[in-house]
Image (tube, rainbow, N blue to C red):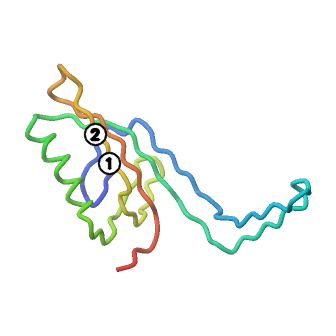
């Protein structure tokens, strides 16, 4: 079961991980791409995007939304994300949280959460 900050993420439909090399790339004017200057000195970063839904009573769904938004309090200190796919713990901050309540379905909320992995600076 996937969690963030100990809060269940319910039914995870997809989890995508993008790890970026953060490469410095400087093309050279009037030259082809094989002449570009490339350096790996900026480090890597990982973005994790989770798409899923949470089911429950209206009160439980409101609590889910409130709990996730409470983690995004403007002074995040880092949360542990446990992936249902890799079962690996990662320290993350929540970049974005989008949630949608479909008309006529009172017992489900769809969501997308974007996480950034790293060591949190206080």
Asked whether the residues under the numbered discs 2 and 1 touch, taking CB atoms below 8 Å apart as contact, a structural biologist would say: yes
At which x and y percent is residue 50?
A: 41, 45
Q: How busy is the neighbourhood of tag 1: few (under 14 within 10 Å), some, or many (20 plus)?
A: some
The residue tagged with tag 1: helix, strand or loop?
Answer: strand
Q: Quadrant of the C terminus?
A: bottom left
Look at 26% across and 66% down and name the residue there.
74
The residue that label 1 is drawn on is: 97
Q: Which one is nearer the viewer's eye here, 23 or 46?
A: 23
The residue tagged with tag 2: helix, strand or loop?
Answer: strand
Look at 39% across and 78% down and name the residue there.
121
Look at 25% across and 59% down and name the residue there.
6
Q: CA distance from mark 2 to mark 1?
A: 7 Å
Drawn side of residue 11 relative to residue 108, left or right: right
Q: Which label was assigned to residue 36? A: none
At which x and y percent is residue 8?
A: 26, 49
The residue that label 2 is drawn on is: 99
Drawn side of residue 95 relative to residue 27, left or right: left
Q: Is residue 20 above or below residue 104?
A: below
Drawn side of residue 95 relative to residue 56, left or right: right
Residue at the top extreme, as displayed: 104
Q: Is residue 75 above or below residue 61?
A: below
At which x and y percent is residue 46?
A: 53, 59
């Amino acid at each position: 079961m996937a969690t963030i900050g100990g809060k269940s993420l319910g039914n995870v439909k997809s989890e995508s991980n993008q790890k970026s090399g953060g490469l410095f790339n400087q093309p050279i004017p009037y030259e082809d791409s094989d002449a570009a200057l490339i350096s790996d000195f900026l480090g890597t970063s990982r973005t994790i995007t989770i798409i899923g839904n949470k089911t429950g009573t209206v009160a439980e769904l409101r609590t889910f939304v409130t709990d996730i938004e409470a983690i995004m309090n403007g002074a995040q200190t880092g949360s542990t994300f446990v992936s249902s796919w890799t079962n690996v713990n990662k320290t993350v901050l929540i970049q974005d949280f989008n949630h949608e309540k479909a008309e006529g379905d009172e017992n489900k909320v769809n969501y997308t959460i974007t996480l950034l992995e790293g060591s949190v600076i206080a």
